[in-house]
Image (cartoon, helix red, strand yellow):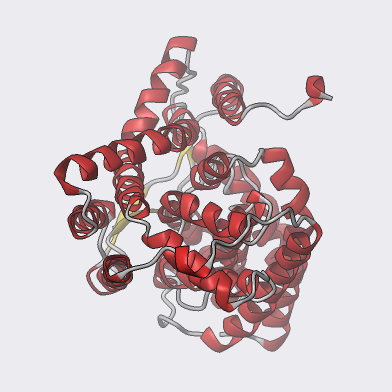
Amino acid sequence: MSRHRFPHPLALLLGCVLLAAILTHFLPAGSYERRDEKATGRRVVVAGTYHPVESHPLGAFEMLVALPKGMADAGPVIFFVFLVGGALTVVDRTGAFAMAVEGLARRLGGSPTLVVPAVCVLFALGGALDNMREEIIALVPVLLVLTRRFGLDPLCAAAMSIGSAAVGSAFSPINPFQVGIAQKLAQLPLLSGWGFRLVFLACALGVWAWGTARYAAGCRVAQPPAPPAEAAPGGRRQGLILILVLLTFALFVYGVLRYEWEFDQMSALFFAMGVAAGMAGGLGVEGTASAFVEGFRSMAYAALLIGFARAIYVVLEQGRIVDTIVNALFAPLAHLPLLLCALGMMVVQAAIHVPVPSVSGQAVLTMPILVALSDLLGLSRQVTVLAYHYGAGLSDLLTPTNGALMAILAAAGVRYEKWLRFAAPLVLALFALAMAAIAAGVLLGLR
């Protein structure tokens, strides 16, 4: 059996980097012209301007150089993962998380029946509001404490967190990094069509939460014995630290939504929270610093996967074939009937998300092209946004180039092929739901 195991995540990503480098030798180089978009503050492509450019196939050494370049490009995300991981390790050292999980277990009698859907809804809300991805990586140790206490397989930690967040993002009516940017580029009113999206978000979350709960019910393992009541962890310090953590997350959401914080601001916020938690928890300077180092060490592998995943895009971009891939995939859609064209847009967006794993980057790359195409065919721009939103968002659940997904699976100790066996059937069901939504949008004339 071991001879036929799926490749190690690091080997898988290196294979993808190698494949990307090989493609630069065979695919023609090409590029779209670009302009600055005032509505989004981003540089977007100009539809109909694709043209050949001088090829730049990458050699073996250039391919290797793309690895540190990928790490550098993903620098803000990687440092965020390190600092948040360190801060939450400090909180864990104080016993605050153990107290919270034990208190939850006692109130629910040790049954995960309500825990699984509740945690799914919580992370789906984070995905819908904030496109939560990399932020989850540092929470994996906490989630593992929760799953162990309720006798659940570690895969449940990934399913309840990154899985639910991805579903929330993909079907969100208000996600500023996906639907917000796409609607601006399509010159649609922000939050337009939110009621339509909300209906399908509820359906999609129901599918994912049901699948996760069903898996959890079938993989329960022996639970650790609950500590006696008098030995239950708890105390005023831990309670204050938990309040500090909740306030930090509230400020984090407010800063992102109100002030458009980037990873640098978020990293600083969580670092400050970690220091404050360590002092309040009685760890002192030495204990707090030691906990931070332990957190950095635990996040190193996850951070490495994020950088290697980014290197795939670096290779394609340096080889000047990203626009070539986009143009080749979208060109045949113009010859399809209206409904098939809309469904084809979603499928193509899912495929493009493999080499372009950034949802906002994919929006500025593809939406101007698709808006021009949809106007030409008489297809609603709102439906075009749906096709992008569902295709890119659902692809996040499976693609190995999603550095956050691979890092979370690695941190949880879940092999990628095990995740595929669990997630693939649910993702197919969600794609069917998304296709139904797009078809309904076309038939109802969604605007």
- Residue furthest to the right in view is 1
Residue 335 vs 357, above or below: the answer is below
Location of residue 234 by image quarter: bottom left
Q: Which residue reaches farthest left?
A: 285
Q: Residue at x 43, y 11 (%)?
A: 61
Across and down, in percent, residue 317 comes to 44, 33
Give the total number of marks visible in the rendering.
Answer: 0
Q: Nearer the viewer, residue 338 or 387?
A: 387
Q: Residue at x 35, y 48 (%)?
A: 89
Q: Quadrant of the C terminus?
A: bottom right
412 w.r.t. 98: above or below: above
Query: As displayed, is residue 192 above or below residue 70?
Result: below
Q: Position of residue 30 (x, y in %)?
A: 49, 35
Relative horizontal placement of residue 79, taking residue 2 as reference (left or right) = left
Is residue 182 in sight in this rendering?
no
Front-lying residue, 414 or 377: 414
Write the residue at 50% across / 32% down: 312
Across and down, in percent, residue 249 comes to: 32, 68
Q: Residue at x 54, y 63 (%)?
A: 165
